Image (spheres, grey):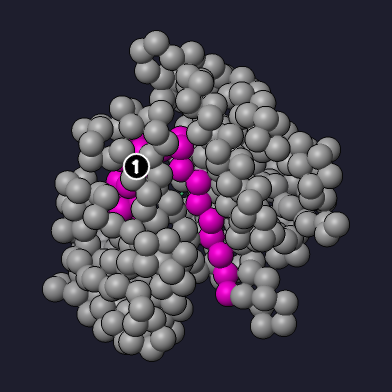
Amino acid sequence: MATYKLFLLPGDGIGPEVMGQVRRVIQWFQDKGVASFELDEGLVGGAAYDVHGESISEDDMKKAMAADAIIFGAVGGPKWDGIPYDKRPEAGLLRLRKDLALYANLRPAIVYPALADASSLKKELVEGLDILILRELTGGVYFGEPKEITDLGNGQQRAVDTQVYETYEIDRIARVAFELARTRDNRVCSMEKRNVMKSGLLWNQVVTATQKDGYQDVELSHMLADAGGMQLVRNPKQFDVIVTDNLFGDILSDVAAMLTGSLGMLPSASLGAADEKTGVRKALYEPVHGSAPDIAGKGLANPIAMIASFAMCLRYSFGMGDWAGKVEAAIANALDKGYRTGDIMQPGMKQVGTVEMGDAILAELETLA
Ligand code: IPM
Ligand code: MG
């Protein structure tokens, strides 16, 4: 049996609590003899700043580089609002994405049958929803240079962020979109702002050219990103895979997340290029929700997105798609039985905390195994 090296970065806020439930799921896999994991743990975000004065230490960066997969909790909180910009908690996450070249961010938005009522949209609009937002994660305005605030000397300042994309960056994310579409409903919708931005124009052209170069079997459509946001709340089920840039992907994936009833439900995977020799991709798995400082440390956080992120890890890093499916089914079954954390609580259901939700999911996993 292969042993996989997992590097856990629980981070801040509810990160450590939800990570605690993933540890239990990992332990379950070990106990069952299904897979063997070697675990190491590091600090990121405010937790790292408090100890090292940086949002991630060099030592932990090395461990992240060497791991087969990184399981990431959440970063940030009001405690670190005043610290220097380059040391803020989010910088640790951005550095991991950039230095590990994790350019493909998969954000599935799935509505669990038991939660179709929890969405802010009408049930019939979201029931059965299964879309995948593919966000470009290492380029665009997040990382483009110059990125600065300069003093104009007249009491005014000038802030610049640079939206920049090169052909290869668009081509490689488009290829991931088409490959993923083939495993689903075979449709890709690309979103940009070609009517206003040069980077949108190039994005549109490159995605179109990439589809012609080997992916003509996949249906491709284009939408302006603002219209795409509107369509996501008007008729989300029209989409299969949405591919978009770093900033639009940040926004549209939050919109898509909310269609499912709670940000606490959604996992994500951030993948790098496949190694030429081994075919292995660097990978980081993280819930889409943030650190939720308001409920941190109270045992109330919803661990589902974190556990579902580990399921994505099984699928995309370790080729254990069957087991990933079982973890996901265990989550769905726990919800079917009425277990709800506060964020997804509904009348008549059973409100539980983080650990009890972990218990319920593990019990279902045991049954499915
Ligand atoms: C996300 C988050 C991050 C982002 C923050 C924490 C830097 O919002 O992963 O969506 O903007 O990418
Ligand atoms: Mg975001």
> What range of the chain is rendered magenta?
249-273
Left or right of 297 on screen, residue 180: left
Q: Quadrant of the C terminus?
A: top right
Q: Would you identify the image quadrant in which residue 142 lies?
A: bottom left
Residue 169 position (above or below residue 67): below
What kind of residue is marked 1? Gly
**Residue 50 seen in this snapshot:** no
Q: Which residue is labeled 1 in the image? A: 128
**Residue 352 seen in this snapshot:** yes
Q: Quadrant of the N terminus?
A: bottom right
User: Residue 34: percent from the left, percent from the top?
Assistant: 79, 47
Q: Would you identify the image quadrant in which residue 60 lies?
A: bottom right
Magenta run includes residue 270: yes
- Front residue of 215/231: it is 215
- Front residue of 322/259: it is 322
Q: How many other residues sit within 10 Å of disc 1, few (<14), some (14-19) or many (≥20)? A: some
- Front residue of 366/115: it is 366
- Which residue: 62% across, 75% down? 274
Secondary structure beneath disc 1? loop
Residue 118 position (above or below residue 227): above
Q: Residue furthest top?
A: 348
- Which residue: 43% across, 69% down? 182
